[in-house]
């Protein structure tokens, strides 16, 4: 385990190699600086976690800094609720930002840069509307056409841009465009729009501005203002890099930041876009952004993922330029690996079936010692009460057993984990024919730990004592997206199973919201932090016990 981990960390990713080159060539006379720049228009998801781990880990590795910057240049979709959740998530993942920045703090400087471009004859105010601009833009195979407003004088442009800022024009009536090259093979260089009018209140600047910079213009300036050296972003911005560099060159920054792109994270069975995740919340498909089914950082936190497991996952998937789809089983394996030696085991019966041990004395209770974690003997044992009436899983009984069924059926004997050998003698049913109770007998000679070797049984099942059991609610989840059978992923209509009548051993009654356990034979669970009450506890399944994930090679 340790060897493998060290091995992963010693391998340099391609971004580190690029930074090494820049250091060697002494490109920057300042410390290495990265940033994580979310737009506060939704909650962070596991894809963002990859970017967070990457940016903060790079800064740490090179003894530099990483900023958290809210890229809040679009007033309409942004909200302080999102700002707060993003800060909470980054901290929870275990990272500390150097400066907390807001792109909106730089609006004055950005405006100034736009004026600089106008004065250099490199930007103009255009009266074409959005549709016309699109038409004039050309296609990948045809060059675009220059706007009829492209040759306005510098004086006119300065005046019109000032008037745009003053609020003289309606949304969309005018835009400011960079004057670059309408026949460039790179569409992003065909006189891109760099400022637009939006008469909308901004969550931080209020009504101060009615012109807002476009992402491609704002982002390089944000990076430059913060002295970022390496601006790491996802592959879809590769074609924007020439524009990123153009903006920095023409607005005159020394030792400008350098953009490096890497592949987005995609995970099987997982929706990964704020826009779609927001729709799930808005449509009520899930309860909230932090619903345990959501691949948001807050959803995964509530589901029971640990920061360690998410950082481990981001380390394992690595950083590359080629897009890839990561198996969700790898993610699940990371949380299993993290929890297996950390959490205690508890017995919980999800779907209880009553068992009466007819030869066990009425009114008697004894305590069985059950190990807290079979991998870690130092975690000790706990006392679990055993008496005449117990619950077992309904699925641990079959009236007519199928082949190789070693659990309870009439006439069969099994081991009740940590207690005795128990034999099923009689099946009690209600009028409708449903099994309501099993009458069983125990063999006092077979007590666990007594060294009994008289005979062997093939099945071991878990149980809880009926008199002291704590009723709890247990929730199991399925993926939001599933394969439709033809290799396409579709939305899963059935993503939650609730066990409302689950019965737990008394020790689980002392659990606290946020506490994690292994439920024997069922998987890893966490007490829900939102819905659980002291006298009505709710547990979420984090992940089942079995892994379908197999390491390559
Ligand atoms: P979405 O498409 O889900 O809305 P976004 O890219 O619009 O995401 P931003 O808030 O702009 O979200 O992203 C902040 C940072 O996180 C960006 O640098 C972006 O490249 C990175 N990021 C977003 N999604 C992923 C992903 N799936 N994998 C890796 N990095 C991502
Ligand atoms: Mg975005």
Image (tube, rainbow, N blue to C red):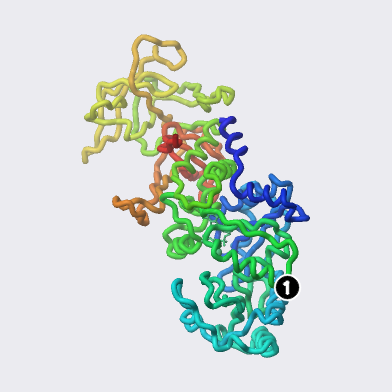
Q: With respect to residue 27, does 141 lie above or below?
A: below
Dividing the picture into quadrants, the one containing residue 359 is top left
Query: In this figure, what is the number of numbered marks?
Result: 1
Residue at 62% x, 37% y is: 10
Q: Which quarter of the image is occupied by the C terminus?
A: top left
> Can residue 523 be seen from the camera position used here?
yes
Split into quadrants, the picture shows ligand 1 in the one at bottom right
Residue at 64% x, 66% y is: 245
Residue 312's x, y, as percent? 56, 41
* 466 left or right, relative to 514: left
Q: Which residue is mark 1?
A: 109
Toward the top, the furthest residue is 454
Residue 331's x, y, as percent? 49, 43
467, 179: nearer the viewer: 179
> Can residue 199 be seen from the camera position used here?
no
* 205 left or right, relative to 530: right
49, 232: nearer the viewer: 232
Dividing the picture into quadrants, the one containing residue 217 is bottom right
Mark 1 neighbour class, 10 Å CA radius: few under 14, some 14 to 19, many 20 or more: some
Residue at 62% x, 66% y is: 244
Residue 152's x, y, as percent? 63, 89
Q: With respect to residue 112, does 93 lie above or below?
A: above
Q: Which quarter of the image is occupied by the N terminus?
A: top right
494, 127: nearer the viewer: 127
* 127 left or right, relative to 96: left
Q: With respect to residue 526, does 232 lie above or below?
A: below
Helix, strand or loop under label 1 = helix
Residue 393's x, y, as percent? 36, 34
């Amino acid at each position: 385990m340790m060897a493998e981990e060290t091995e992963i960390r010693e391998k340099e990713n391609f971004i580190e190699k690029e930074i090494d080159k820049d250091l060697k060539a002494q490109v920057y006379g300042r410390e290495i600086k990265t940033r994580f720049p979310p737009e506060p228009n939704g909650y962070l998801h596991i894809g963002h976690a990859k970017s967070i781990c990457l940016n903060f880990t790079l800064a740490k590795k090179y003894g530099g800094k990483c900023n958290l910057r809210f890229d809040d240049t679009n007033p309409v979709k942004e909200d302080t609720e999102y700002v707060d959740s993003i800060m909470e998530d980054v901290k929870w993942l275990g990272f500390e930002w150097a400066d907390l920045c807001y792109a909106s703090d730089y609006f004055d400087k950005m405006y100034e840069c736009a004026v600089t471009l106008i004065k250099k004859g490199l930007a103009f105010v255009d009266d074409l509307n959005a549709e016309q601009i699109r038409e004039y833009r050309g296609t990948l195979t045809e060059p675009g056409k220059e706007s009829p407003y492209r040759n306005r004088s510098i004086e006119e442009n300065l005046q019109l841009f000032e008037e745009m800022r003053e609020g003289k024009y309606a949304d969309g009536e005018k835009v400011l465009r960079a004057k670059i090259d309408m026949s460039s093979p790179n569409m992003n260089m065909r006189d891109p729009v760099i400022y637009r009018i939006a008469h909308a209140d901004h969550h931080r600047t209020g009504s101060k501005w009615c012109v807002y910079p476009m992402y491609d213009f704002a982002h390089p300036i944000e990076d430059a203002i913060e002295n970022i050296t390496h601006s790491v972003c996802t592959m879809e911005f590769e074609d924007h890099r020439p524009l990123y560099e153009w903006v920095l060159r023409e607005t005159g920054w020394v030792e400008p930041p350098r953009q490096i792109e890497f592949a987005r994270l995609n995970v099987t069975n997982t929706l990964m876009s704020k826009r779609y995740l927001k729709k799930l919340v808005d449509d009520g498909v899930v309860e909230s952004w932090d619903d345990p089914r959501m691949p948001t950082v807050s959803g995964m936190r509530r589901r029971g993922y640990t920061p360690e497991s998410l950082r481990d996952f981001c380390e394992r998937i690595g950083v590359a330029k080629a897009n890839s789809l990561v198996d969700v089983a790898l993610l699940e394996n990371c949380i299993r690996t993290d929890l297996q030696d950390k959490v205690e085991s508890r017995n919980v019966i999800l779907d209880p079936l009553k068992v009466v041990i007819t030869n066990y004395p009425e009114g008697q209770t004894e305590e069985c010692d059950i190990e807290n974690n079979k991998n870690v003997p130092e975690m000790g044992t706990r006392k679990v009460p055993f008496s005449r009436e117990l619950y077992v899983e309904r699925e641990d009984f079959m009236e007519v057993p199928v082949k190789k069924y070693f659990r309870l059926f009439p006439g069969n004997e099994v081991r009740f984990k940590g207690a005795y050998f128990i034999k099923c003698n009689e099946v009690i049913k209600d009028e409708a024919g449903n099994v309501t109770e099993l009458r069983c007998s125990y063999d006092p000679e077979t007590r666990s730990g007594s060294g009994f070797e008289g005979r062997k049984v093939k099945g071991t099942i878990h149980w809880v004592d009926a008199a002291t059991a704590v009723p709890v609610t247990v929730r199991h989840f399925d993926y939001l997206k599933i394969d439709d059978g033809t290799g396409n992923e579709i939305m899963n209509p059935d993503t939650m199973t609730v066990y409302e009548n689950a019965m737990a051993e008394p020790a689980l009654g002392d659990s606290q919201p946020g506490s994690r356990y292994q439920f024997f034979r069922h998987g890893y669970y966490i007490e829900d932090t939102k819905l659980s009450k002291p006298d009505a506890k709710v547990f979420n399944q984090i992940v089942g016990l079995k892994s379908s994930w197999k390491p390559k090679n």
